[in-house]
Image (cartoon, rainbow, N blue to C red):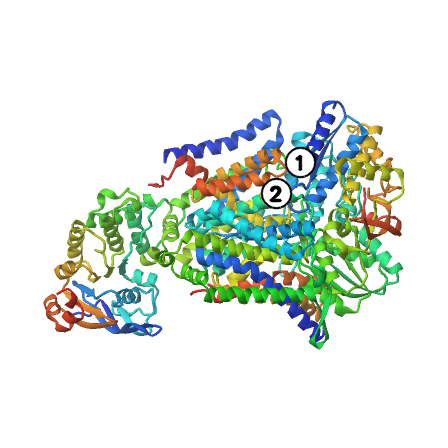
Amino acid sequence: MSILLLIEQALNGLQFGVMLFLMAAGLTLIFGVMGLINLAHGSLYMIGAFAAAGVSALTGSFLLALIASLAAAAMAGVFIEMTVIRRLYDRDHLDQVLATFALILIFSEGTRYLFGSFPLFLDKPEWLSGTVMLPLGIEYSLYRLTLIVVGLAVAAGLFWMIARTRVGIRIRAGENDREMIGALGVNISRLYTQVFALGAALAGLAGALIGAIQAVQIGMGEPVLILAFVVIVIGGIGSIKGAFIGAILVGLTDTLGRFLLPQVFALFMDPSEATSVGSSLASMSIYLLMAGVLLFRPKGLFGEA
Amino acid sequence: MTDPVLDIRGVSKSFGGLKASDQIDLDLRSGEIHALIGPNGAGKSTLIAQIAGALAPDSGEVRFGGRDVTALTTAARARLGLARTFQISCLAMDCTVLQNAMLGALGHRGDVFRFFRPVMRDKDLVARAETALEQVGLQDFRRFRTAELSHGQRRQLEVAVALTLAPKAFVMDEPMAGLGAEGSRQLMTVLDRLRQQAPILLVEHDMDAVFALADRISVLVYGRIIATGSVAEIRNDPAVRSAYLGDEA
Amino acid sequence: MKRETILNAVILLALLMLPVWALFADEPFLITLTTRAVILAIAGIGLNFALGFGGLVSLGHAAFFGLGGYAMGILAYHAQNYTPMMEWPLLIEGTKSMPLIWLVAIVTGALAALVIGALSLRTTGVYFIMITLAFGQMFYYFAISWPAYGGEDGLSIYVRNGFPGLNTMDPIQFFAICYVLLLIVLFGTWRAARSPFGLMLGAARQNPDRVQAVGQVPYRLYLTAFTISGAITGLAGALFADLNRFVSPAMLSWQTSGEIMVFVILGGVGRVFGPVAGAALFILLEHSLGGLSEFWHIYLGAILLGVVLFARGGLYGLIVGREVAHD
Amino acid sequence: MKLKSLIVGASLAVLAAGSGWAEGVKVGMITTLSGGGAGLGIDVRDGFMLAIKQSGRSDIEVVIEDDQRKPDIAVQLSDKMIQSEKVDVLTGIIWSNLAMAVVPGAVAQGKFYLSPNAGPSALAGKGCNKNYFNVAWQNDNLHEAAGAYATEAGYKNAFILAPNYPAGKDALTGFKRFFKGDLAGEVYTKLGQTDYAAEIAQIRASGADTVFFFLPGGMGISFLKQYADSGVGLPVVGPAFSFDQGILQAVGDAALGVRNTSQWSKDIDNAANKAFVESFQAEYGRLPSLYASQGFDTANLLISAVEKADVSDADAFRAALEAADFASTRGDFKFGPNHHPVQDIYVREVIKEGDVYTNKIVATGLEDHADAYAGECKM
């Protein structure tokens, strides 16, 4: 194993991590501000990917597809916030889990009703295809590199928005003290809808970006959803910074685990057996990471103790 | 004079730069009601939390019944006989009044991990709970759901639960808060009798109640005890007058 | 109080009469379907012990359900192939005897719940939900990739395990076994809910500070409840595997956890009989909606959403109302 | 909307068949019609029902139920079909794990089972049964053909990957059984994995000269898109599952030129196949897939047996099935001693016909190929 391969794998982990962050940021914001645990976040990711695939098929433009994904997911977000989610804010987590579980069923089968049972086609644009040469002679996919850059840019934008803008101040106020934002004369229910739409749009964007290099199909959201939950729990629920660190940690652990664990086992086992055992352990690695973090920090890395 | 039941020695606790408790010495002797007063933000709740075991002090020790309990949990202190009532009613709201009282009796008796015998048929527990309810005058409400009780009745129930623990000392955090005149009067009668059973450390805002009930008063301001003494001594203490009663007088 | 008792009786009677009628009407599948409802009800009762009585929202109960299933699968697999499970340090043989399998499933479920609970109960709220989910996922992926017992293909047991004096392959006899077990579990749970432990656990759910103030430790109460919950769910898993004569990692998936939770909610959280009503209702819905349309999950989702939003307390809450006092 | 009319069509066919039913045969079809993977079940069902409809027989009644891809639901449905619907023949299951849950119990109760897709090794070897017929393939077959093709094409150093579950392990074992070169790497991925960056980086670094993969469903789509994007560019070989009609359109250009192995292709030159492809397109408005052809063949096998024998005479009916006297879309078709197909397996290449991605046959991978487990089967 060369050091270059290790660096390339670390880049892959980073790319996976920043995309997870787009999902996790919305989840953690929604939890931080509204105290809501939203299982249907994965469905918004799926909606983003399907909208992008649909618009891309019609217009052939990837940028339009991305805009469509943002718009469709945000609209779906606003719609469910105003019809369903809003009624759940003052409920306990159990009700929230169940209601949003129900939303998953509705969204998944509804999408299947509209788009059929077969996966859809969505491809990255011509101008983002191919590979680039990075320093040290690493040949790396241009699209994945773009994902890293876009992901980091969105993360930076989000941090800036929360630290500097008026909406950001309200969001932070909402996290600390719900009565206070009411006292500040902020229209709480509008703020909540906005935050939800923002989270939904981020999930939709992630769905479209990832959809270009993965299968756009029913049920694509749930595996990502579970990973995103692992991310925000590791980072500390409600903390954007935690979500970012958690996402990178999970991305690296998963990618490097898949890569390194079989090789570690191969040192003292038959190769075929080692691949099998190593990859079994790798598929559990992020859950082990999460359990480990929670045992030492029951509120996550950046959660309020 | 006998050893104090509860003895707080040099307890300090800071949050960041804020000294919530600053070298606090306080004791509670048998047969007395010792009132702890002070303006909002003086650190009363922090002190109560440290006495009850919900917060660990940075330094100093809490002694109870002649033994150092600083390292013990809330539950362990409760089992030793330190009964606490809460500032905001802390009851199982979906249970009946009787069941809440039985919780105390059961917790005190200790045989919680029994899964088969219906608890309501446990005559001993029911009797203990009913005695306590009678003491606070809630015997007619035993079958009510706790959530249906009035604010004042919940305060009384808090005291009743504390009673079932057969405590050696009470720590009561603003039991009169939010009670009307009638409610306060009722509860005062109860507390007045109670001090014979076990001494009470009473944190209270209601000055009339404090002056009527307390044998001794300590005044807490900015995390420090600025005075301790009888009702008369405190009324006339110039430091107290300026720091605390000043704005009332 | 009265109405709840009547509803309990109606549900139990309906669950009993349906298969009996089916026996005479020669509709054996109806018996199988009812048996399924009965077994899922036991799983729901298991979860309800933690969720309803202890307020512990576990999204990882599929782990105990699946472990119970695998306890049955592995024991029967070895008995079926005449291979010992373990030869060293002590010889352990497989078995086809139901009571023995149940015992193993209960113990396995309890032990797993004890360990998972001991770790997970250090956290609360959403963290607890998620860490239980994570433990469930670990078991799931382990089962899929562990080749010894079939991995994702699962294990098929060709003949249902035996119970002394009964022919378990006969649907009505197997139903009788499950129904009696349901009654036992219900009775045990009903007593436990009214026991000293039940009282203290209920208080710990509503107000942990109160429990500490009376000298008890909530953590121990929660852990005990979680362990009992795991044991009951494990038993249900063994029965479920026996009903299907098959066990696979699907039993361990997080959707299974979600479904068990749905039974509890449909019926009514914290009601002893709630999960029984919920499981029966779920099977009924699955069966009637499934025939309605290929997209029946939409309707299921809508109904579930309706229950959560507008009918808090589930079926029991709807019919019985909010009466609680039970002395 | 399109789907809906299609369902109506299918149920009409059922009704039409049911009305005249006298002493015919009742078939229970358990297949995946909802949730992820529904596309495969729908294809099998449509292929099957097309054959029934074309036969014009009124003595075959088909009951169709959705297993949601859940083993316990599949078992429940099979109980229902056997106990309540009293079917004679079961069919339809797509996935090996569901087949393992249903088949042993069903055949133990004396029912016939015709598998239109899954062929787990346990049912081909020690667990074979006289009432179990596989009309598709034993799971290893296509992978074996891929191995044989890779050897023939002169590849010396293959990188192979599959998900970490039994079918994935069978796939790699099957490939290795017929591949004579070396392995540059062998990787098991997580079932349902969506990101393959780590694996692709390993492929790039491995020095392999070809890549074999078995990643069914969405996993294959994801892998191919990412592989094409990575610029690794080594030739890829795989079984037909990731290159089939249903999902090729979702993969797009990334699949072009890939060699894949299949026992069926829409350009197999025989009358039955031509008629099938044409009529399927006419009926459902899309090109048939591998799965549709398997459903179609399964139904025709059944019809051929019904024509010869009465299902109540199990031995005669079984003999009629064994004869496999029907015009298969694959050309020659016969059963081996373990009731699994002995058939040619082709190598196809992904091409673009106008706007549609599809396959054409470029070689024959293995001729008259049987499976490796037949010897273990004692019927």
Q: Is residue A161 left or right of residue B72?
A: right
Asked which secondary structure carries label 1, the reply is helix
| Amino acid type at image mark 1 | Lys
Q: Are marks 2 and 1 in contact (CB under 8 Å)?
A: no
Q: Is residue A218 left or right of residue B4?
A: right
Tell me if mark 2 has few (under 14), some (14-19) or many (20+) residues whose alpha carbon lies within 10 angstroms of its own. many
Lateral position of residue B29 relative to residue C1, left or right? left
Q: How many marks?
A: 2
Q: Is residue B203 above or below residue B222?
A: above
Quarter of the image for the C terminus of chain B: give it.
bottom left
The residue at which mark 1 appears reads as D4
Q: Residue D161 or C278: which is nearer the viewer? A: D161
- Labels 2, 1: one chain: no
Q: Quadrant of the N terminus of chain B?
A: bottom left
Q: CA distance from mark 2 to mark 1?
A: 37 Å
Q: Which residue reaches farthest bottom?
A: A136
At which x and y percent is residue C209?
A: 34, 57
Of A83 and B40, which appears nearest the observer? Answer: A83
